[in-house]
Amino acid sequence: MTAANAGAARKPVLQVEALCVELRSRGGAVRALDEVSFDIAEGEVLGVVGESGAGKSLTGSAIIGLLEPPLHIASGRILFDGQRIDHLQREQMRRLRGKQIAAIFQDPLTSLNPLFTIGDQLAETIRVLRDIDAAAARRRAIELLGEVGIAGAAQRLDAYPHEFSGGMRQRVVIALALAGNPRLVIADEPTTALDVSVQAQILQLLKRLCRDHGMAAMLVTHDMGVIAEMADRVAVMYAGRVVESGPVRDTIQNPRHPYTVGLMNSIPVIGRRAAQLTQIDGAMPRLGAVPPGCAFNPRCSQALPRCSSERPTAFKQLQTRVDCWLYDKPHD
């Protein structure tokens, strides 16, 4: 049974329901996330993809309680193992974050203190999350480094972050994320700063750890190739909205929303000769300047008259959900 099929039979670890995030300004509230909804089951990887400014990272920040004022959750719900977490106090969320929900960011140097050894940082994190003594924390740190593929873990424990390569530092960050045995991992562009060959190793590592530990994972990326390699399901975001979501193979082989089609057509394919890559004309709208109706309509070559005034509802296409008026067709 695949992770996707197994996940379908289980209750979701994470449920995001009609999440709206707004930015307070002198001119009033500006909506940054607009009714974002998805769920992730145990052992499943959901890839969240879109151009810069689509709202991918902001969604992750909202889930782990790291929105900075004047950003705030205006409406909707976030449920973790069936319990609401979007209204928790800062201290309650801090206890949940790290132990139950972990995060992996794109630049490992922002997650590691250059003044302390890898072992000190791992052991301190472990002792904060688990009630064990220093010796036990050090042993667990060695185990975690070995699990993420760092050879000679016991000897490398006393090294400093600058003594590791970029790929090795990212493995350390993954070990830090695993320290509390989390149920959910938010991975925000975890391979962007790495060489291509190292990217593949880190992606395979994350995929294996999710499978072995039964963790749910939200993988934020702008790279459809990473989604194809890593995810079970995909959510395509545009201008703070999810415009298409479904099984990754179905979405990649048969994209339905014109924006998803554009993303797929912009990827070079080995063996297919083309004078130039297809591109999506125009740019992502700025916050506060999202057009009415379908936010993608100014860039869409298939836009209908209603697209500029009416926001599309979600239409079901087999296992895929697509927010596009092209699929509002009468049944025979």
Image (cartoon, rainbow, N blue to C red):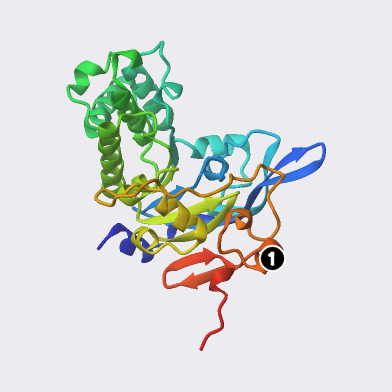
Residue sticking out furthest to the bottom: 332
Residue 310, placed above or below residue 185: below
In this rendered view, identify the residue nearer to me: 331 or 110: 331
Give the residue drawn at x 82%, y 36%. Answer: 26
Q: Which element is circle 1 on?
A: loop
In this rendered view, identify the residue nearer to me: 263 or 190: 263
Residue sticking out furthest to the top: 115
Residue 21 place in picture, x, y as percent: 65, 46
Residue sticking out furthest to the left: 152
In this rendered view, identify the residue nearer to me: 95 or 103: 103
Residue 314, placed above or below residue 68: below
Residue 167 place in picture, x, y as percent: 30, 27
For mark 1, does the 10 Å Cα neighbourhood hold few (<14), some (14 to 19), or many (20 or more) residues?
few
Give the residue drawn at x 51%, y 44%. Answer: 51
Q: Is residue 127 left or right of residue 209?
A: right
Q: Quadrant of the N terminus?
A: bottom left
The number of callouts visible is 1
Q: Quadrant of residue 198?
A: top left
Visible residue check, residue 236: yes
In this rendered view, identify the residue nearer to me: 80 or 320: 320
Residue 161, placed above or below residue 52: above
Visible residue check, residue 81: no
Q: Is residue 267 left or right of residue 139?
A: right
Q: Quadrant of residue 70?
A: top right
Residue 122 place in picture, x, y as percent: 35, 24
Which kind of residue does numbered mark 1 sit on?
Glu
Residue 293, placed above or below residue 140: below
Residue sticking out furthest to the right: 27
Give the residue drawn at x 31%, y 19%. Answer: 119
Give the residue drawn at x 32%, y 31%. Answer: 175
Residue 171 place in picture, x, y as percent: 30, 29
Q: Which residue is mark 1?
A: 310
